[in-house]
Image (cartoon, rainbow, N blue to C red):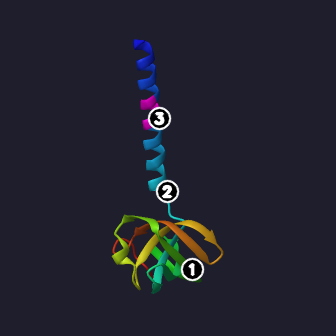
Amino acid sequence: MRSIVWVAAGICLVLALATAFFAGRLMMAPPSAVVEVRSVDSPALLAATLLERRRSGYMRTNSALQIRVSPQTTFVMGDRSALKAGAVLGVDGDRHGAELDADRVVVLTGYVRVR
């Protein structure tokens, strides 16, 4: 009986470590898009400009992106109050052309340079 308990405890430990490892890797994954918010059309809809990574920061592109933010969207750094014109965001989610349904938002304003 004792060995069954130890085996079960070992399996639980392995599963917990694997979950923590993969969750951590997902949190560190680069965002699907880095954008600069142009306007907040509603609390759930942002108009943004796609940014391109450069050596010294990010550069604005000519590509526009509509971002949908739902109540289920997770904020890693910052919160919803940061969603305003000029904000720089790293956004993960499902992208369909020029629209992105945000699953995760990282507020990068003040941490990155935009040219």
Does the CB distance between marks 2 and 1 fall below 8 Å? Answer: no
Marks 2/1: CA–CA distance: 21 Å
Of the numbered discs 2 and 1, the one sitting upstream in the chain is: 2
Q: Give, as a three-letter code, the residue at label 3.
A: Leu
In the displayed structure, 84 sits above or below 1; it is: below
- Tag on residue 15? 3
Residue drawn 51% across the image and 69% down it: 102
The C terminus, quarter of image: bottom left
Which contiguous range is marked in magenta? 12-16
Q: Main secondary structure of the magenta part?
A: helix
Query: Can residue 39 be seen at all in this image of the molecule?
Result: no
Q: Give, as a three-letter code, the residue at label 2.
A: Ala
In the displayed structure, 95 sits above or below 3; it is: below
Residue drawn 47% across the image and 27% down it: 11
Residue 27 percent across, percent down from the top left: 44, 55
Where is mark 2, residue-wise? Answer: 29
Direction from residue 52 to residue 7 in the image, left or right: left
Residue 103 percent across, percent down from the top left: 50, 64
Q: Local crowd at mark 2 within 10 Å, few (<14), some, or many (≥20)?
A: few
Marks 2/3: CA–CA distance: 21 Å
Direction from residue 79 to residue 72 in the image, left or right: right
Does the CB distance between marks 1 and 3 fall below 8 Å? Answer: no
Residue drawn 43% across the image and 37% down it: 16
Of the numbered discs 1 and 3, the one sitting upstream in the chain is: 3
Of tags 2 and 1, the one toward the viewer is 1
